[in-house]
Structure formats: structure tokens, C-alpha cells
Amino acid sequence: MLDPLPLPPDCVLRSATPADKPLIQSLLEQFRREVLPSLSDSERTLRGLAIAAGILLGGYLVISLKPGQLLPLVGVAGAVGFGVVAVQVLTWNEGWENFWVIEQNDRLVACAKLRCYSRYSVLNDLFVVPELRDRGLGSYLINNLGQKATKPLYLTCLPSLVQFYMRLGFTPISVNHLSPLLQFDLGIPNQLTVVPLVMK
């Protein structure tokens, strides 16, 4: 592992506070805009058609089902929808405290989420604002969180970043060596091609 550059004197690494939540969300939105491919016109059209088909199917079911058959269907759909929203809200509300941030002159310029379990840790959502990249902030953050983590420490990255993480002590690992729960924690599978890595 390479020694990271020291943190610039106007920067400080600290654990996130509740007041950081909107700022972290803003950084993660920037991160997703950079990483996730933007939708083409044809993809937008297909998604619109899928939504329209769902509405038409729902309307057909409402019209064709007898009144006694409709209530259980609406109840199940409502419970599933509420459950999905509740899980997302609870996950985010519990998750902000797992974030670490680098602050420069009262502005958050980098973040990462470290979740430590009894047998391993997971690093997610590492992001440094574009104008401060190549100044060692990401390396500094990873090195410090790596020291706090229960080993092994897992993360996923885009193929173009594998060499960066390998210089910091991570090794690529096959998805087949990861439990389904760990794959879920790492965001595998998703719509991106990502490479899982581990630091032991």
C-alpha cells in the first residue's frame, strides 16, 4: 500500500453529522450523474411505454374484477409499495452516520460510507469533487477508513479505477467468492459493470 499524500492544511476528515445529510446527498447525486449513463431518447420512450402499460393493466383489472376481488389486490400492492418506500427511508436514516467526510473551509468535498460488521466491512459511495481530484483526498480517505475497518474490507469500482484501488492495497476478487448478502451490500448485480475488490 502506498502512503497517501497528507491532507491539505485547509481540510479535515471527520465522521458525518445529521447536519451533513443534505450535503452528502448532494455529493452522491453528483457521483451518480458521473457514473450512471444518461438515458437515451429510446430508453425514455421504453420506460414511458412500460409505465403506460402498467396503468392500462391496472385500469383493466379495476374494471374487470368484481368488487370483492379488487380489495385484496389493492391491499397487496399498497403493502408492497409501502414496504419498498419504508426500507429506503429507514436505510438512509440509519446510514448517514456510517459516512465519513472531508471538509474544506466549511464545504464537504469528499465522502465515503464505511459499514463495519463482525466479520468484514464494506466501503461504498467514495466520491471526491472533480476540482479536487488528484490531490490525494481519495487515498487519504481510503487509508484512514481502511484502518478503522474490520478486515477483510470489500468495495466495488468501475473497471477504469481498479489500478487506483490496487495501489492502495486492494485485490480484485471473483463475484463467485462473495455471499449473496455481500453481493447485495456491494450493489451487485446492478446496471453497471463493476469489479469487486478486497483488502485483507
Image (cartoon, rainbow, N blue to C red):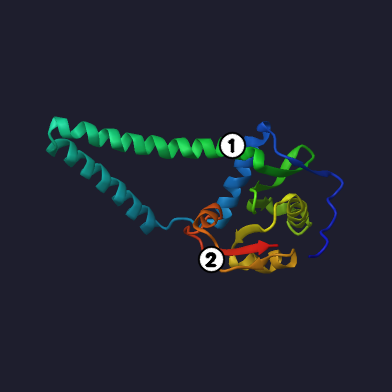
Give the residue at x 52% y 64%. 193
Where is residue 125? Give x, y as percent.
Answer: 62, 50
Density class for disc 1 (Cα within 10 Å; few <14, some 14-19, many ≥20) is: few
- Residue for badge 2: 175
Where is residue 182? Give x, y as percent.
Answer: 55, 55
Give the residue at x 36% y 39%. 80
Return the residue found at the far right: 9
Q: Which quadrant of the structure image shows residue 20?
A: top right
- Residue for badge 1: 94
Q: Earlier in the sequence, mark 1 or mark 2?
A: 1
Density class for disc 2 (Cα within 10 Å; few <14, some 14-19, many ≥20) is: some
Q: Secondary structure at mark 1?
A: helix
Q: Secondary structure at mark 2?
A: helix
What kind of residue is marked 2? Answer: Val
What kind of residue is marked 1? Answer: Glu
Q: Nearer the viewer, residue 29 or 74?
A: 74
